[in-house]
Image (tube, coloured by chain):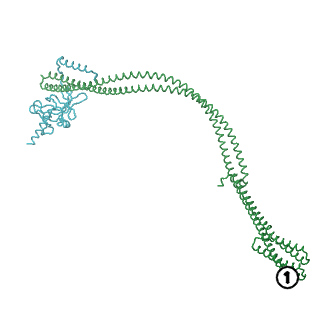
Amino acid sequence: MTRNWTFGRKLGAGFGVMVGLAVAIGLVGIVALQSVVRSKDRVISVNANLLIDAAKLQSAVNKKSASIRGYLLDRDDRLLDEMREARQDFTAAAERLKGAVYTEEGRRQLELVRSAEADHQSASEGVIALRRSGSPTEAVARAFADQIMPKRAVLGKQLQDLVEREEALLERARLAATDAASRAIGLVVLLVIGVAVSGAIFGVSLTRALARQVGGAVGQVQSSSAELQAAANQQAVGAKEQATAMSEIATTVRELLATSRQIAESAQRVVQIAQETARAATGGESTVEKAHESIVGIRRQVDLVVGHMVDLGKKSQQIGAVVEIVSELAEQTNILAINAMIEAAGAGEAGGRFAVVADEIRKLADRVAGSAKEIRTLIDDIRAAVNTNVMATETGSKAVDAGSRQFGEVASALKQIAALVSTTTEAAREIELSTKQQSSAVEQVNLAISNIAQATRETESSSSQTLQTASQLADLSKGLLRLVQSQEALAA
Amino acid sequence: MNEKGTSAPGLAAELRRAFDRSFADAPRTETREVVEILSVQVSGEAYGLRLSQIRGLYPVNRIAPLRGPIPELLGLAALRSKIVPVYALGGLLGHPSRQPPQWLAFTGAGEECVALALDRLEAHIRVAASDISTDAGPNPGRPHVRSAARMGERTLPLVDVPSVLEQIKRRIGAHSSREE
């Protein structure tokens, strides 16, 4: 996750960590110092005071012993006062010790001291009373040696034990305080070492991260600047080509403008021609209507012709039947003539003239048969012609029907043409208007193209500036890279 | 207008004029010697029959089939109130016809009258006697043809009807002899 952190963030985090460690060191030092202070305070305020008070006890006992000894020697009451004063000091110190001693052993030791002091006091007062009574010095001296000196020795021993104990406690407390201070120092040293190591690690990692991130960024900047240079070059080349194209487009647009004007003029002429065409179509519509009526009449005539042709075919068939009869008659006549000639030939000389007549009849029959044959041929021709004519007439009738339908379609088409011509007129007017608008638009386009050409030139200039900026950016990135990477890395 | 360029009314008028002229003209007399010939077709072959050798020409109405002594006998027919045998001329001339005959040439005399069956009647022609060529001897390929008529480039073989009748008579006689 930290890979995505910004360099400032990492720097801030590192400084935060360092500050945190410093604060921790400070807190630990403060705590350690406080612990040391408490230890020393305890040594000073408790153990040292206890030792002092113990010494005071010892001093008060010494003072009291000296006062008692002096009184025993001099019988001076002031010494008794000094003894009582010393005893008060002893009591006060004992009371302080009682309140300050913090161990059972100490309190028992203190009680032993106080008990020994009370025993010593009691023995001392007995001896003092003895002295005051005027007892001899020797008795007093013996009493002193027998009663006071053992108590004094016990008291001295108890006091010495107390002082030694307190001294031992003081030494122990001092050593404990010294140990605490040493631990605190060690802890602080450890923390300082940790902070130093952390700082070194942080510095190295931060340096590496800086080198890596800034190096990567600089590499990207270099790559981007190279791409920017290439893009700027392309843009410059494109701008030049665009300028050339704009010039060509401007020329084309001017031609387009001239063409649009020509189209507008042509549209005007189209409107005029369309109006004339509409009038012609209207006239053509009435003409077609008349032609349609004529075709209907032709249709009726064609039907009549077909009827006549069919009648003619029937008559031709009848004629053919009659001609067949005539042909058969001619053939039979021919046979009769031949047989007559045969008979005439059998009749000898008398049949000669009869044979001539029979021959004439045969010839006539031959000619009749030939004529009948020709007539049959003619009739066949007539029937064929009639059939052809009927077929042609029927074809004509169909053609007339088709023509009639086509005339109807022509009339409908002429109506559509008239409507379309009207639409065409409107469209031509719209074209004229649109073309004028188009001319205006083309003029605007021409102006826009001039602006674009100007913008293209500016783009070309801007591309040069971009190229220069990209070069500067590349140099800057190299400089920045030198700042964050070593020469070896740069060389690598 | 017909193919010859003569109109039908003109043709009728021409026929009428020719008919009237035949009555108006003086009787013609043939100065040259002529031979009347009937041009016929038998089994697809053209032959001529002298009118002088037949007694009549008739269309075929009905031939009653009849088994006879020779295979060329087709049957019997009624001609001129006579029952006459009908023979196929094609078979007698050596090349039998496969189509039914259309004409019968009546010939013979007395009780020996026969009818010769012909396939088609072509025409009646008149040829000068000088145009008739006579053959010296019998031709094995064309029996009963003894002469021919020249008609321009064409030559029409003439059937000798008496020879045909003689062959029929001879074959019938031979058959009768075999039966006896």
Disc 1 chain ID? A
Which chain appears cyan? B
- Residue at the far front in the pictured view: A133
In the rendered image, the quadrant that contains the C terminus of chain A is bottom right
Label 1: how many residues lie within 10 Å, few (<14), some (14-19) or many (20+)?
A: some
Residue A207 makes an appearance in the image: no
The residue under label 1 is A146
User: Percent position (x, y) of residue B153?
Assistant: 25, 29
B3 up-or-down from A91: above or below: above
User: Percent position (x, y) of residue A118?
Assistant: 81, 76
Rendering quarter of residue A441:
top right
Residue A88 makes an appearance in the image: yes
A345 up-or-down from A472: above or below: above
Residue type, label 1: Asp
A223 up-or-down from A129: above or below: above
- For mark 1, give the secondary structure: helix
Rendering quarter of residue A176:
bottom right
The residue depicted at 72 percent of the width and 47 percent of the height is A476
Rendering quarter of residue A102:
bottom right
In the rendered image, the quadrant that contains the N terminus of chain A is bottom right
Front residue (pair A444, A351): A444
A221 up-or-down from B4: above or below: below
Q: Colour of chain A?
A: green
User: Percent position (x, y) of residue A328?
Assistant: 19, 27
Front residue (pair A108, A480): A108
Front residue (pair A14, A459): A14
